[in-house]
Image (cartoon, rainbow, N blue to C red):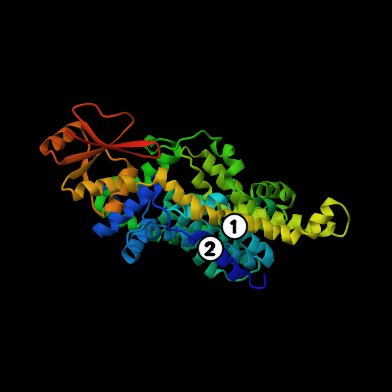
Amino acid sequence: MSRPAPLLLLLAALLFFFALGNHQLQGSTEARVAGIAMQMHLDNDWVTPRLFGQPFLEKPPLSLWLDASAIRVFGGTPWAVRLASAFAGLFSVLLLYAMLRRFGRPKVVAWVAGAMLATMASYWSNVRGVGEDALLSLGVTLALLAFFQTQQRQAEQQPATLSWLLFALGIAIATLSKGVLGLAMPGVVIFAYLLADNLIEKRFALGHWLKPGLLTVLGLVPLLIWLYLLYQRGGLQALGEVLWTNSVGRFDGSFEEAGHYEPFYYYLAKLPQAFLPWNILVYLGLWHFRKSLVKNRYLLFFSLWLVAQFTLLCLASSKRTVYLMSLTPAAAVLAAEYAAVLYERLRLRAAGEGFWSVVGRQRRGLAIGVLTLVLGSYLATAQWVAPRADRQLSFVPLITEIQTLQAAGQQVALYQANERAGGASVFYTQSLLKDVQTEAQLQEYLSASPNNVAVMALQEDPTPPLKVLKKVTISRQAYYFVSQ
């Protein structure tokens, strides 16, 4: 631990980048986002994201810009489109360590918090995948840590200009990654903290409320510029789809097509696995520090970060476990602080006799052993488990069959293509296949030439006059190659 920052950098880089490209796109999110990024690269249209030729306005395009840029520089590989998420995770870990040191926390506590963040199972898996959630987490983490830094500097009557600028940068990253959610996730924590602070101090400081609001407006400028350019292309309908349908609609459940709708207790049922393998430290830490929150603003802030965001997500209609990713930095801090408490207790018991005294004397070796075991399990998963999952989750067999037919002079179309198949086809073929939407269009297309083939995602075998040429199954979804 004589050089904790380089050691943490090495640990996080190893976790996030080792064997990053040794497996294909897996799951609906990776295929969809990679396909949109590839089409953005091919069309050179950096304003309107498109999925299989159609505008896709569920999220702002920051992650797509980075993925399309990586494709342009490194080529169209799974490794290239995973780089943005991996770097976002790396920056988040180092940022957490650096800010905890600025908050006056010991090097060991700051290092353990960073290491726990990097080794949380859900965080690790999402950082190594294609998507916008790692960037959202980075933006939220930067905004909230910078905000708390401003509160400390204001209490010490010191200037906080740089911290406020970092806060605005965090808001820009978060909102350009996830839109309104990127504003709500840090906003609910700041509101809860300022409210708690005012109640504890029994005073209302208007300036403490105005400054975050004004700097938030500054952070929204990049998003507003993109929305203006989008408005020039798609008018009010495009803006409404981004700001209302895919934001408010997902929260209140009015956008039924979005899916992922779960009961309010959904995340409560996920708590046993939310922050593995450090769950028990997180929850015991919350309980242990509960009586210290009034006097300790540092613990109060990170506790409210966890509780306020969790409450907000429970109130939303659309729920997925990946949405908990923005909570993980706060969870890592609470887990590290409580781990420090337990470590000190073991140190005090080391001089006695009995089982706990033996454990206390071996506490350093045990801690290193646990971290080594966790690190080894993740590296083994990256090296061997993830590639094996290609057998069930990869779209390469489907795309290979399409390319084989095309090489033989046959034309291939996708019938009512789902997001996964449409995105994967664009990414791997680097082209746009013919899109067939209705049964009438399908019949017309197949009857136009005996060389025309359609790919259909169905639950049951197609019926005559359709003739099945081949069947490919991906993650329990059957895809049929049919002709007439």
Q: Residue at x 49, y 56 (%)?
A: 383
Counting residues from the start of the chain, the first of labels 2 and 1 encountered is: 2
Q: Position of residue 309 (x, y in %)?
A: 55, 47
For mark 2, give the secondary structure.
helix
Q: Which residue is mark 2?
A: 14
Q: Residue at x 88, y 54 (%)?
A: 353
Residue 380, placed above or below residue 463: below
Q: Residues within 10 Å of mark 1 (few under 14, many from 20)?
A: some
Q: Is residue 411 left or right of residue 391?
A: left
Label at residue 361: none
Amino acid of disc 1: Leu
Q: Which residue is mark 1?
A: 375
Find out whether the residues at labels 2 and 1 contact each other: C-beta distance under 8 Å. Answer: yes
Q: Position of residue 11 (x, y in %)?
A: 57, 64
Can residue 203 be seen here? The reply is: no
Q: Is residue 5 left or right of residue 38?
A: right
Q: Residue furthest left?
A: 448
Spatial CA span between label 2 and label 1: 9 Å
Amino acid of disc 2: Leu
Location of residue 273 (image quadrant):
top right
Location of residue 163 (image quadrant):
bottom right
The residue closer to the viewer here, 195 or 144, is 144
Q: Residues within 10 Å of mark 2 (few under 14, many from 20)?
A: some
Q: Position of residue 320 (x, y in %)?
A: 48, 42
Q: Residue furthest bottom?
A: 2
